[in-house]
């Protein structure tokens, strides 16, 4: 304090800016450290599909970092190989330097997830007698986990493994089990024992168990 006056010093903290370039629009934007890739994409006019609301659960906003690096908060829905190849979830990855981003075609990222709208019916063949028939069969299955190169949904992934193991072409599954399918497969690390009723016309899957 001098001569009864108080002097205030003014200063500004300037956040570092980083250039993010998107190949799909050949557009670059400058954003501060910590900006989500999805926000940078929005500023660049790049439309990313985020049906999960940016929660990192659907994997449909996956992009590939071709130059530079980002900090990934979550890699859910991405395999270790995907991450090694530079893939990141735009809604879960923040900018920490200049980066160039490849946006894959959306159809490549689509995941046809099982929903409550999926309908499955179990057909009992004419003449089937549960008192005399013993149709139960257990089949151990090892499924290939999803990756950027294999976006098959969980139900078709299970059918494919069953077809390779048994030759069964059109298995069926109960709706309650279908709704739990994704959780079971991931919980068991893609290794399950399928309980089949082989006397049914299309060998319905009645249950999935730990190996």
Image (cartoon, rainbow, N blue to C red):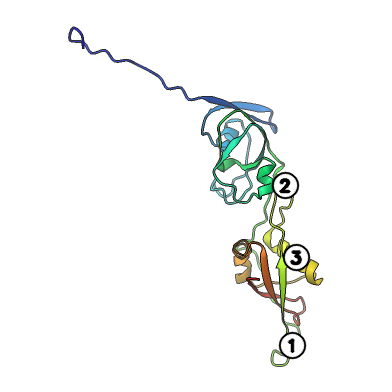
Residue 161: image tag: 3
Expressed as whole percent of the image width and height from the top left, the position of residue 186 reads 62, 61
Q: Residue at the location (54% across, 43% down)?
A: 73
Label 3: few (<14), some (14–19) or many (≥20) C-alpha neighbours in 10 Å: some
Please report the residue visible at 75 percent of the width from the left and 80 percent of the height from the top: 198
In what quadrant of the picture does the C terminus appear? bottom right
Q: Residue at 62% of width from left, 44% of height from top?
A: 61
Q: Earlier in the sequence, mark 3 or mark 2?
A: 2
Q: Residues within 10 Å of mark 2 (few under 14, many from 20)?
A: few
Write down the residue under mark 1.
Answer: 128
Disc 2: which residue: 108
Residue at 68%, 46% in the rendered image: 82
- Could you tell which of marks 1 and 3 lies nearer the N-terminus? 1
Q: Residue furthest bottom?
A: 132
Q: Is residue 120 visible?
A: no
The image shows residue 39, relative to residue 56, as above or below, that is above
Split into 4 quadrants, where in the image is the N terminus?
top left
Assess disc 1: are there few (<14), some (14-19) or many (≥20) residues with their C-alpha within 10 Å of its C-alpha: few
The answer to which image quadrant residue 157 occupies is: bottom right
Kindly check if marks 3 and 2 are in contact, taking CB atoms under 8 A apart as contact: no
- Residue 29 in the image: state x and y as whole percent: 59, 26
């Amino acid at each position: 304090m001098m001569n009864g006056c108080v002097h205030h010093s003014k200063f500004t903290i300037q956040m570092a800016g980083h250039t993010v370039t998107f190949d799909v629009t050949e557009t670059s934007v400058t954003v501060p450290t910590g900006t989500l890739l999805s926000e940078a994409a929005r500023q660049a006019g790049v439309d990313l599909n985020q049906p999960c609301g940016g929660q990192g659960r659907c994997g449909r906003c996956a992009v590939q970092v071709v130059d530079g690096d980002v900090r990934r908060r979550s890699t859910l829905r991405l395999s270790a190989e995907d991450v090694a190849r530079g893939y990141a979830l735009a809604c879960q990855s923040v900018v920490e330097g200049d980066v160039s981003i490849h946006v894959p075609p959306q159809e490549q990222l689509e995941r046809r997830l099982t929903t409550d709208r999926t309908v499955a019916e179990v057909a009992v063949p004419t003449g089937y007698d549960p008192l005399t028939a013993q149709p139960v069969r257990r089949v151990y299955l090892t499924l290939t986990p999803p990756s950027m190169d294999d976006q098959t949904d969980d139900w078709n992934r299970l059918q494919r493994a069953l077809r390779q193991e048994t030759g069964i072409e059109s298995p069926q599954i109960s709706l309650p089990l279908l709704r739990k399918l994704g959780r079971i497969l991931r919980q068991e690390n893609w290794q399950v024992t399928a309980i089949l009723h082989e006397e049914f016309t299309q060998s319905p899957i009645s249950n999935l168990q730990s190996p």
